Image (tube, rainbow, N blue to C red):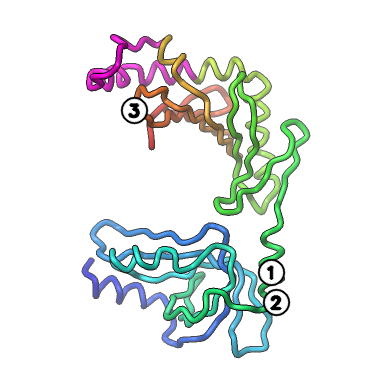
Amino acid sequence: MGKSNQIEQFEKRFADEVIEVAAVTGPSGIGAGRATGDVMWNASIPVIAWKEIHSNSPAIQKELRLEWLVNDDEWQKTRDIFKANTIVKLYVRKGNKAMMLVKVIDTAYQDDELQSILNEALKPIDYKDSKLGTFKLNKAVKLFEKEITWAGQAGILYFDWHENEQEMKASLATAHILFQDQVQWDAKIRAYAAEELVELANDWLQDNDETEIDEITKELFIELMEFSSISVYSDGDFEVFFDDGDMFWGHSIIVSGHRNGTFESAEIAG
C-alpha cells in the first residue's frame, strides 16, 4: 500500500475532532509493526487510563492503544518519545479501542487522579499456588512467572494472566501434571526433540568449521540441550524451551506438547 493510501486508511479509524487529553502509559512501552507492502510503521503504546483535560468527568480506566504512523527515519527518532508507566499530555483523535496521536504536549504531566491510578498499577501482583508456590506478574507481557528447578536444572515457569481465575487454575493444572513426574517428562521431551531435530543438527554441523564433533547422535543431542523455561496453558498445551548447546549456533529449541502425553512439534527459533 502506498504512503498516502496507508495514511488515509489509518486516519479513517478515528474521529475528525482533535481533543486534549492526559493519559497514563502502560507497562510495555512503545512498539511498532508494518504489514507486508506498507511503507509506514504503525507505532503504538498502551494506555491504561485517560481523561479529557477540559472536562469534569473522571478518568476512564480502560486499556486502549495510542497509535501513530511513522516512516523509517521518524520511527528511529520517536521510538523512545514515551516511557512506560508515565503520565503524558497529548492532542489526539478518538477511535474504537484506540486513539490517534496528533501532537505530544508534555511527557511528564502532573495530575493527582491519574497519579493515583498509576501508583496502584505499579503495585506488584502475586499469585499463590498451593503446589508450586508464589508467581509474580510481569505486567509488560501479562505473564505470571516463577523461578523453578526442572529435572535438576534451573529455569522459569510461565502462565498467562487472565481475568477469569479458572483459566489460570487450568494452566496450573497443566503444570501440576508435568511437575508430578518431571524426570519422566523431561526424558520424553528431550527424546522427542532429538528424534525430530538430530538430522537437522547434523546438517548445521557440516557448516561449522570450528567444531571437533564428527556426528551428533541422539544421545549427544539430548546431553547438549539445556533447559530454559516452560510455558503452560489452560487447554493442556505446554511449550518447553531449551538452549541449543550451540548445535544451531545459539538458537532456542522449543518442544510443544499436551499434558495427555502427545507432542505437536520440536523446532528451533530465535
Foreground disc of the pair 1, 3? 3
Disc 2: CA contacts within 10 A as few (<14), some (14-19) or many (>=20): few
**Residue denoted by label 3:** 249
Tell whether position 140 is magenta. Answer: no
**Residue denoted by label 1:** 117
Q: Residue at left 68%, top 81%?
A: 58
Rendered view: 3 above or below 180: below
Q: Residue at left 34%, top 63%?
A: 76
Sooner in the amino-acid sequence: mark 3 or mark 2: 2
The N terminus sits in image quarter: bottom left
Chief SS of the magenta region: helix
Rendered view: 17 above or below 5: below
The C terminus sits in image quarter: top left
Q: Which residues are magenta?
A: 190-218
* Cα distance between the residues tagged 1 and 3: 45 Å
Tag 3 and tag 2, C-beta contact below 8 Å: no
**Residue denoted by label 2:** 113
Rendered view: 238 above or below 18: above
Sooner in the amino-acid sequence: mark 1 or mark 3: 1
Q: Amino acid at mark 3?
A: Trp
Depth check: 233 or 247 in front? Answer: 247
Q: Residue at left 66%, top 79%?
A: 111
Tag 2 and tag 1, C-beta contact below 8 Å: yes
Q: Residue 165 placed where, x, y %?
A: 70, 48
Q: Residue 133 placed where, x, y %?
A: 74, 35
